[in-house]
Image: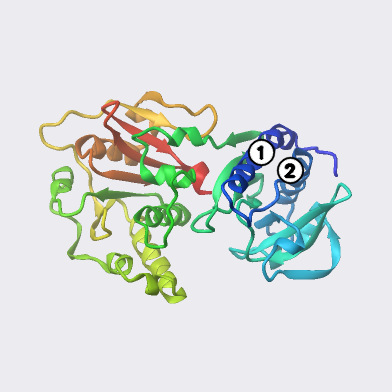
Amino acid sequence: MNNSTYQEAKSASTHLETHFKNLITSALEKGEQKVAPAPDSTTIEAIINVAFWASLRKEEGQSPKISIAFLSPEEAEQPLSFGVRLPFNTDTIVKLAPGIERPGVHLAIWVENSSLYIWGTTLKVPNYCFVLDVSEPGLLVVKHRRLHGFGKYTNVAVLKGDEVKIIDKDCGTAEDSPAIVTALLDLDSPCSWNDGVNVLIQLAVSMRSHQHGGILLVTPPNSDEWRKSIIHPLQYPVFPSFGSLATLMNQSQEEIGQLIWQSNLRSEVENLAGLTAVDGATVMSRNHHLFTFGAKISRKKGNESVEKLLYIEPIIGGEAKEKFAGEVGGTRHLSAAQFIHDQPDALAMVASQDGHFTVFSWSPKQQKVQAHRIDSLLI
C-alpha cells in the first residue's frame, strides 16, 4: 500500500472499516447472500489517499470526476475487464478519468498481496459495495449501494480538504424526522420506483444540481391551506394543476418495471425541479400535482414570525441545536421556515446556489420548526 500523505485518510479509515464490517455482518446474519466484501482500514486509507491527490490533478485542463468501486472481478456482473492489471495510483486514474466519468460507471479495483490494482470497469456492484466518488478537486464521498440496489447510493462520509463529515444514522431515528431524511440515511428506505419519498430524493438531487438555488413546498393533497401563506395574485399559476408526474406514479407495477417508464419519470423530475430555479417557491402536493412556481411566501395572517428553530445536520457531532431562524441561511431559508411554522403539515426543501440543501419540517414533539441540513447526504 502507498503511504498516506493525506492525513484525513487515516482519521476516517478506522471508522469506515467498522461501518462496513457491521453493515455487511448484519446483512449476512439476516440471510442476504450477494453482499460485497468489507475493506479493512489499511485498504480504505490507501484508496482515499490516492483518490484525493488524483482529484487535484488535471488532464487536458479537466479535473477527474470518477467513481471507484472495491470488488473482485468474480463479484461483478458483466464487467469490462482489462487484459492487464493497472497500478492504482494518481497517474493511472488521471489518464483513465476522461473515459469513465459518465454516471453509473465505476472504476473497479481489488487488492492482492497488500497491493491495490485496477482490473476494469463495471456498471453494477454488489449490495453494500464500498464506493468512493471523486466529485470535484479535494471533495471525496464514500458511499455504498443500497441493500436492494434501488435509488441513490447511501453516503457514509464526505471528505473535503481537511474537513471530514461522518454520517450519523442516529440523527434519523427521531420519531419526527422527515421521511426524506430517514430514507437518505437508509432507514426504512424506499423499495419501489414509484415511492413518493424516492421521488422527493430525486427532486432534491436535481434541484441541487442546477445550482440556481430554489424552494420546493410539498403540501397535503386536496388542501388549499397553503394559499394563505402565499402572496396573491400568483405570478405563475398552473391551472389546472399539472399532474404528469402523478400520472406516472399511479401506473401499474408492470409499467413501472420498464426502462421507458423510468426514463419518463426522470424527465418529469428534471422538468419540475427546473422550475424551482425561477425566483420564488414552487408548490407541489404530496401526491405530485404542481400548482404554481415563482410564488412569494408571506407570513400567514394572524400568525407570529418564526424566531427559533432546531438545526440538525446528520453527521457525527451534528445533533439538534436551537438557532435563530436567520442564522440558518438567507431569505430563502427564512421564508421556508416561516411557511412551515404557518403550515406544519407541509414540507419545504431549499437548495442554495453554493450546494447546501436544507429540509424544513414541523416537529410535533418539540413544537418547533426543524431544519435538516442534508447536502452531505445528496452529494
Residue carrying label 1:
16
Question: Where residue 96 sits in the image (x, y, percent)?
Answer: 75, 63
Q: Residue furthest left?
A: 302
Q: Earlier in the sequence, mark 1 or mark 2?
A: 1
- Left or right: residue 10 compared with residue 214: right
Which sits in the foreground, 49 or 34?
A: 34
Q: Residue at x 66, y 48 (%)?
A: 137
Which colour assignment does the render follow? rainbow
Q: Residue at x 24, y 40 (%)?
A: 339
Q: Quadrant of residue 87?
A: bottom right
Placement of the N terminus among the 4 image quadrants: top right
| Res 161 seen here | no
Which sits in the foreground, 285 or 354?
A: 285
The amino acid pointed to by label 2 is Ile
- Badge 2 marks a residue whose secondary structure is helix
Q: Quadrant of residue 18?
A: top right
Q: Residue at x 25, y 29 (%)?
A: 306
Q: Quadrant of residue 266?
A: bottom left
Question: Where residue 311 sits in the image (x, y, percent)?
Answer: 40, 30
Q: CA distance from mark 1 to mark 2?
A: 8 Å
Vertical side of 299 occupied by 31: above or below: below
Residue carrying label 2:
44
- Left or right: residue 364 compared with residue 304: right
- Asked if the residues shown at circle 1 and circle 2 are in contact, with their CB atoms under 8 angstroms apart, the answer is yes
Q: Label 2 neighbourhood size at 10 Å, few (<14), some (14-19), many (20+)?
A: many
Which sits in the foreground, 1 or 4?
A: 1
The amino acid pointed to by label 1 is Leu
| Res 257 seen here | yes
Vertical side of 326 occupied by 90: above or below: below
